[in-house]
Image (cartoon, rainbow, N blue to C red):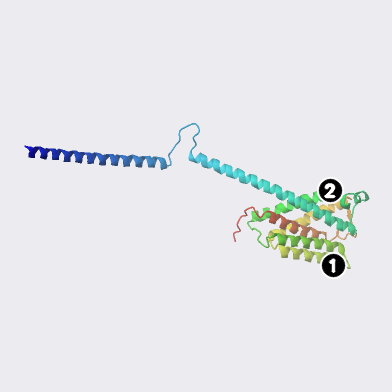
Amino acid sequence: MPRLESRAWSCSCAARGRHNAQLGDAAAGLAAKVGEMLSSSVSGPSLTLVGPGARSPSTASTSATSTTTGSSTLNLSQHLVQRSVVLFVVGAFMALVLNLLQIQRNVTLFPDEVISTLFSSAWWVPPCCGTAAAVVGLLYPCIDSHLGEPHKFKREWASVMRCIAVFVGINHASAKLDFANNVQLSLTLAALSLGLWWTFDRSRSGLGLGITIAFVATLITQFLVYNGVYQYTSPDFLYIRSWLPCIFFSGGVTVGNIGRQLAMGIPEKPHND
């Protein structure tokens, strides 16, 4: 009898152990399935948060994109205003200095009441030239970006300063050099102006804009002189001097290089050959 009881006890213990093992395996499997379901539901694209302040992932990404776009637009606007102010100041200062040189050499004649004003120049000369410099300086990098031809030739401030020095030298030569006639002076200044473009620019957009600026500025000057605002001594090209378009061309290239250098921080469209 004791032997039978011990055998029955051992059989019941073994069956209970197998039953407990089966329950443990089932529980582990159930827990694994629940974990997989939870992980798939969390990582799935159809997760939706419920609550008054909840936002979907698409809404959050759209909001972040709009915020980034708004901040970049604000930065571009601030950069544009800063460049405009710098170009205006540079254009106004150069107009005062170069116009004073022309007046001292009796190349440009203003009415008597104007001579006693600031720097012996008309009050409207600095703001007009400053505005023109701002427009031209902003137009050059804009045209480069539109054409997909970013200007990479000598993009450094040292080159820009040398270009300004050459432009001042060309303007000084127009007032100081004495030739047998104005045609020789005009041809010399034209060669110097093209040399300035070739040395510091060499872009098709720079050449085209320089010619356009020279043409438009010459027409405006003809109109001002025709209406008696001021005049030139010894005019040989209608009401002005024949070398004046060369000055406008070289000035446009110079201000364009300044504007390009100021716009270095703005990404440009790549050029597709």
Quarter assignment of residue 193: bottom right
Determine which of the numbered discs, if any, sits on residue 124 in the image.
2
The disc labelled 2 sits on which kind of residue? Trp
Q: Nearer the viewer, residue 53 or 124?
A: 53
Q: Nearer the viewer, residue 14 or 137?
A: 14
Residue 154 placed where, x, y %?
Answer: 68, 62
Circle 1 residue: 184
Secondary structure at badge 1 equals helix
Is 34 placed above or below 153 here? Answer: above
Secondary structure at badge 2 equals loop
Q: Residues within 10 Å of mark 2 (few under 14, many from 20)?
A: few
Determine which of the numbered discs, if any, sits on residue 23 in the image.
none
Report whether 36 appears left or right of 262: left
Q: Residue furthest left?
A: 1
Q: Is residue 238 visible?
A: no
Quadrant occupied by the N terminus: top left
Q: Is residue 35 visible?
A: yes
Quarter assignment of residue 170: bottom right
Q: Nearer the viewer, residue 223 or 53?
A: 53
The disc, 2 or 1, on the residue closer to the chain's N-terminal end is: 2
Residue 169 placed where, x, y %?
Answer: 81, 63
Q: Nearer the viewer, residue 201 or 83?
A: 83
Residue 78 placed where, x, y %?
Answer: 68, 46
Q: Residue at x 74, y 60 (%)?
A: 161
Is 39 placed above or below 193 here? Answer: above
Q: Residue at x 24, y 39 (%)?
A: 23
Real-space Cα separation, disc 2 to disc 1, in angstroms: 32 Å
